[in-house]
Image: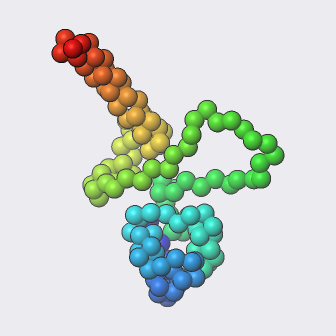
C-alpha cells in the first residue's frame, strides 16, 4: 500500500487530507496503515484530493473495485457478499501476497477463504455429529 507515500509526495499533511475527505486523523491513519479502507464516496474524494488513480495507492490484491452501473432491475444473488477484515501478522500478509495461494491452486484470497470456510463447516458438522451420537449426550 502506498497511500502514505503518495500523500507525502504531494506535500500534504495527514490532518489536511482527513479534513478534505470528511474524516479525522485517527481514521486517516487507519487508512494509511491498512487497518481499514475508505468507503466508496470517501475513496472518490481521496483520489481527487491526491490527484491520482486507485492503482497509485493500492496494489490490485489490496482492494476490490468494481464499476457499478445503475441497476435496471433487481437481481437475486445466490449468496451474500461479505467484506471481511482480518488482522494478520506481517509475515502472514507477506506470505499470502507472495504468490503462495496461486501456487497452491487458489485463484485469489476470496477462493482461499471460501475453501477455509468449507473445511471449517465440515469439521464443525463432524464434531456436532460426534457429540450428538455419543452415549453421554442421550441423557
Describe residue 42's horizontal placement relative to residue 115 as left or right: right
Q: Nearer the viewer, residue 24 or 119?
A: 24
Describe residue 6's horizontal placement relative to residue 65 as left or right: left
What percent of the width, then of the height, locates residue 41? 63, 67
What percent of the width, then of the height, locates residue 62? 47, 57
Residue at 59%, 55% in the rendered image = 65
Which residue in the rendered view is the most extreme toward the left? 136
Q: Quadrant of the N terminus?
A: bottom left
Residue at 68%, 35% in the rendered image = 76
What percent of the width, then of the height, locates residue 9? 48, 83
> In the image, is residue 24 above or below residue 61?
below
Q: Quadrant of the C terminus?
A: top left
Residue at 79%, 42% in the rendered image = 73
Q: Nearer the viewer, residue 67 or 76?
A: 76
Q: Nearer the viewer, residue 20 or 33?
A: 20
Q: How many marks?
A: 0
> In the image, is residue 82 above or below residue 126?
below
Which residue in the rendered view is the most extreme toward the right? 72
Whether residue 119 appears in this view of the structure is no
Amino acid at each position: 500500500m502506498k497511500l502514505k507515500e503518495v500523500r507525502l509526495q504531494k506535500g500534504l499533511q495527514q490532518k489536511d487530507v482527513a479534513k478534505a475527505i470528511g474524516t479525522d486523523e485517527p481514521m486517516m491513519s487507519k487508512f494509511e496503515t491498512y487497518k481499514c479502507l475508505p468507503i466508496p464516496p470517501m475513496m472518490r474524494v481521496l483520489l481527487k484530493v491526491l490527484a491520482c488513480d486507485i492503482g497509485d495507492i493500492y496494489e490490485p490484491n489490496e482492494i476490490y473495485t468494481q464499476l457499478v452501473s445503475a441497476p435496471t432491475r433487481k437481481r437475486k444473488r445466490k449468496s451474500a457478499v461479505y467484506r471481511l477484515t482480518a488482522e494478520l501478522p506481517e509475515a502472514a500478509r507477506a506470505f499470502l501476497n507472495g504468490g503462495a495461494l496461486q501456487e497452491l491452486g487458489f485463484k485469489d484470497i476470496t477462493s482461499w477463504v471460501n475453501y477455509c470456510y468449507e473445511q471449517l463447516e465440515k469439521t464443525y458438522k463432524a464434531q456436532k455429529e460426534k457429540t450428538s451420537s455419543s452415549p453421554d449426550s442421550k441423557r
